[in-house]
Image (cartoon, grey):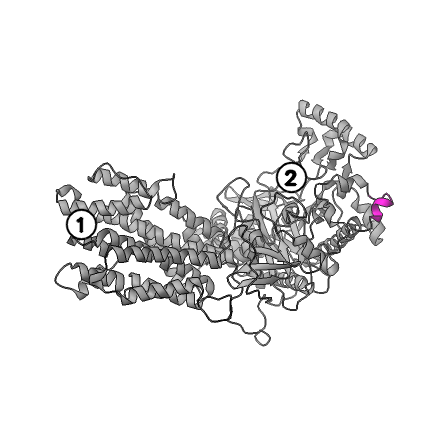
Amino acid sequence: MASAAADTGEDTAAVARRWLTDYRAATPATDVLHAAGPADPAWNAVLEELAERAGDDLIAAREKAQRHAEDIGTGFRIPGESEERPWPLSPVPLLIEKDEWQGIAEGVAQRADLLEAVLADCYGDQTLVRTGSLPASLLTGSPYFLRPMMGLAPPGGCHLHFVAFDLCRGPTGTWRVLADHLRAPAGAGYALENRLAIARMLDGLQLRLNIERHAPFFAAFRDGIAARCRRSDPRIALLTPGRLNASYAEQAHLARYLGFVLVEGPDLAVLDDRVYLRTIAGLKRVDAVWRRVDPRLIDPLAFDSHSAIGVPGLIDAMARGEVVIANSPGAGMLEAPAFAAFLPRLCTRLTGESLKLPNIATWWCGQPQECAEVAGDLDNMVIAPAFGVATNVLADGTALLGSAMPAAQRAELVADLARRPQDYVGQEVIHLSTMPLVSAGRLEARPFTLRVFAARDADGRWQVMPGGFARIGDTPDARAAVMGTGTWSADVVVHGSAPVAPVTLLQSADSIRLRRNPGTLPSRAADNLFWLGRYLERGEARLGVIRALLGHSISADSGAALAADTVQRLVGLVVNAGAAPAPGGLGRAHLSRFAEAAMDATDGWNSVRAINRQARAIGAVSRDRLSADMIRLLDAPYPTRGSALDRAGSLQRRYSALAGLSSEHMGRTDAWRFHDLGRRIERAMATVYALLALAHDEATSDDLSALLDLADSQISYRQRYLTGMARVAVIDLVALDPGNPRGVAFQVAAIAAHLDALPRLSDDGLDEPQQALARALAAMVTTASAPQVGTDTLLALSAKLAALSDAVARRYFLHGSEALRAEGLVVG
């Protein structure tokens, strides 16, 4: 196949050489590409692969990388925003040669061991404080020093299981530490997703550069947590704050990749100092929790009593050794910039070595001499909060360049340094190396920082992810304080001369233990899937009525009384559902405005837009359960252009696609059963309501035709009956025919089958309330005859369906402060 570069008249190698020449001519020697040498084969390989995929168009290469990241489902959320943003991925990775990376990895492992030793002392004997190596106010002044953790020996003897560090490369090529991340280190999932996206885009790089893989790192982390649990086959949960967390998408991806159960606080409960997961099959033991929740909110009994996202009693379970928490609450204390001022000296004292990866020079102003030095040299300092939280002057908690402070703010800082010097640190102004970024259609040098990750393996040793992810600034200013968190991300490639074995998290074929049980289904996940099915079916039913109103052959303007009556009954279905207020008339203009309101109203829960919003919100918290295609359809923008009829058709086709995906692509697990159960209950209810409105004793042919439209049964009816509309025949097809997939009888049979297949708490073999209701409902439908089906029968069916929905919710779903059910407790 001819390359895309052929359109320019150059081969890919020539395009790459031209890019390199132009870039190096405008780039300082501190750039990683420039420093690699004029004929570096690794960078040549990257740019040749880019040219092969995108020709001479670097903008196209960037857009292609973005599409691959979007296809994987990578996203993030800015605090305060409800919608996720697409992950900004650069098509040009950061290249680090294996020998250079080895030095970084050794420095990361040394630093992680040092921080573990400091934590063990701070929450143990506090020898470092007693001997003056650490000021006591560093501990007592930190909001992340958690006194309830004093004297608590964490299970397995480790406070830290997974850590991250932000590194920078200076003008001389040396690497230094900018920040430590110990509370809930984020970004490993983004590093994994970056690698997946770039591997899809530049699929020839792996063999050309012998790139180190991420899978062994994640396997080591999973084995390391499991090794510290008391059971040989532990259940591990990833505790998330929820979908509004900035990195929720990353957390869902990691949980699915690692085989962890994604849980929120209410999913867990503590009983007799053991942690359990509330599932549809009762309580299931949890042995380890990888938390992404603020440690101060993790247990309202131990820390913040106002926390609604924590698990009461979790710290007691940890103290008894019954659950491993990674990382241990209280570890975040060492993230404070003030601690960086003491780490070089502590490293020498505790390990006998100097830091292999030194941190940036830091002066804690809680010491008189250091405070005077900072105050006297503000123009050459970055001023930061000592403990990572807001101060009187740094109200948003972010660092500022001293030279950039207005005179009034500088005076305020000097005054606050005199009042509360312990709240501030001074740090040297760091100038960063640069790397290539696609900007304005060409490669331009931009400053970057590197986030690296380390995890304990089963033997307790630190394994460092070969790579991580780079954050790239969008302006040429190379000062770290100016760049902030960066605008773009990039994959980080560690490459060498030796081939790399293809390792994955999948076990080898001869060692894997076969299983057909898909694993634990938490009650919250079942609840979400059930209501996702209901909302999707409800939206489809609502759209069916709107399309019947706007596109049915009935003409409300014709003056035909019966046609107008049918339209009025269709309007009643929408009004009774609470989707829109009754229209002022039945003319086309009135019906058009009525349909617009039923579709687009934002001041209620029952318009199509509101239903779509609810389904989308559930999809956002179900990333670990749904396919990428389903998530993409749920996330698709609500249509706002075109007529109401066109938009209704577009949305109905989207809902049909979602129904097809769930029917044909979801495994027949309990998760699918709850999703389909929700669909069946909602469809049965909607059909019963339509029967009540349109199959009355005086039903006209227009009424019956509209009913067949709503039940999507026109073709089935006309294949059977050639003599026109007959009320009894329509009722039999729509309500009682078990072979009609849109009919009530079909839904009732499917509901009963699902409930029979779902787990029961007791072993006596007797029906639970939801199964008993389903059997009664099935018997009612099976024994009914079409001529006798009237209003009373249909109202009874509606009441039983509502009672069945309530029974399913009571049995399987969470109910806030409801007492913990111990019956059926299974330690599995």
Frontmost residue, 673 versus 422: 673
Magenta span contains residue 128? yes
Frontmost residue, 447 versus 76: 76
Q: Residue furthest right?
A: 131
Q: Residue furthest bottom?
A: 510
How many numbered badges does the structure rendering display? 2
Badge 1 amino acid: Ser
Occupied quadrant, residue 255: bottom right
Q: Position of residue 392 (x, y in %)?
A: 68, 30
Magenta span contains residue 260? no
Which badge, 1 or 2, is on the more N-terminal residue?
A: 2
**Quarter containing the C terminus:** bottom right
How packed is label 2: few (under 14 Cα within 10 Å), some, or many (20 or more)? Answer: some
Residue receiving disc 1: 553
Give the magenta-colored segment's residue range. 126-134
Q: Position of residue 170 (x, y in %)?
A: 70, 44
Badge 2 amino acid: Ala
Q: Secondary structure at mark 2?
A: loop
Is 787 placed left or right of 58 in the picture?
Answer: left
Determine the residue positioned at 73% across, 50% down.
Answer: 149
Residue receiving disc 2: 478
Is 398 placed left or right of 2 in the picture?
Answer: right
